[in-house]
Amino acid sequence: MRPAEVLSGIIDLMKLRAELDQLNLDPAAKTQVAAMIQALLDQAKQEADAQLQAKDAEIKRKDFKIEALTFELARLRRLQFGAKNETLSPLQRDLFAETLAADSAAIEVELEQLTAVQPATTVAKPAPTSPRRPSAITRASAPY
């Protein structure tokens, strides 16, 4: 039963109780019917409260599961993309150091060969010139 259905049922029972007061019944019958109505109202309220508590418990369980999955996903992303995974293994580090040393030595030798063959001279570059305007076109000046 949905809470809206329970609420409409409670309202219907309350109307019934008001109508009961308007009837011409003996007091014992009125009391007995009123007790039945009250029992039905209490039962409907208890059912609604139980459903509400069950749904609250389910929401809390799902929220906990979502939070646990979020933390697990963050942990897995840290493992996958963390700085530890970007570091080189000892074998890779040694290979990189050897390659770096060999490349540095080769660059130094090549640099020494180039400086020994060619003395350091600077060549002056000609200044850039703009294309000449044909003599038939004159410059017009506009006063501002």
Image: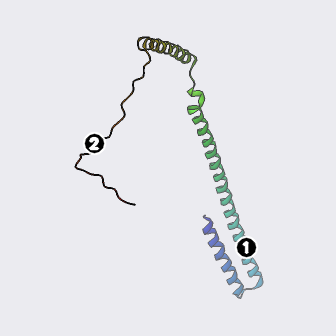
Above-or-below relation of 9 to 21 = above
Q: Which image quadrant is residue 85 in?
A: top right
Above-or-below relation of 68 to 108 = below
Q: Residue at x 69, y 67 (%)?
A: 45
Residue 56 picture location, percent across and down = 66, 56
In the image, which is nearer the foreground, mark 2 or mark 1?
2
Q: Residue at x 57, y 36 (%)?
A: 77
- Nearer the observer, 113 or 123: 123
Residue 68 picture location, percent across and down = 63, 42
Is 19 displayed left or right of 131 in the figure?
right
Mark 1 is surrounded, within 10 Å at the Cα level, by few (under 14), some (14 to 19) or many (20 or more) other residues, namely some
- Nearer the observer, 99 or 139: 139
Above-or-below relation of 85 to 103 = below
How are the residues colored?
rainbow
Q: Secondary structure at mark 1?
A: helix
Give the residue pinned by disc 2.
132
Q: Residue at x 70, y 74 (%)?
A: 37
Residue 22 picture location, percent across and down = 70, 87
Give the residue pinned by disc 1.
38
Q: Which image quadrant is residue 38 in?
A: bottom right
- Nearer the observer, 4 or 82: 82
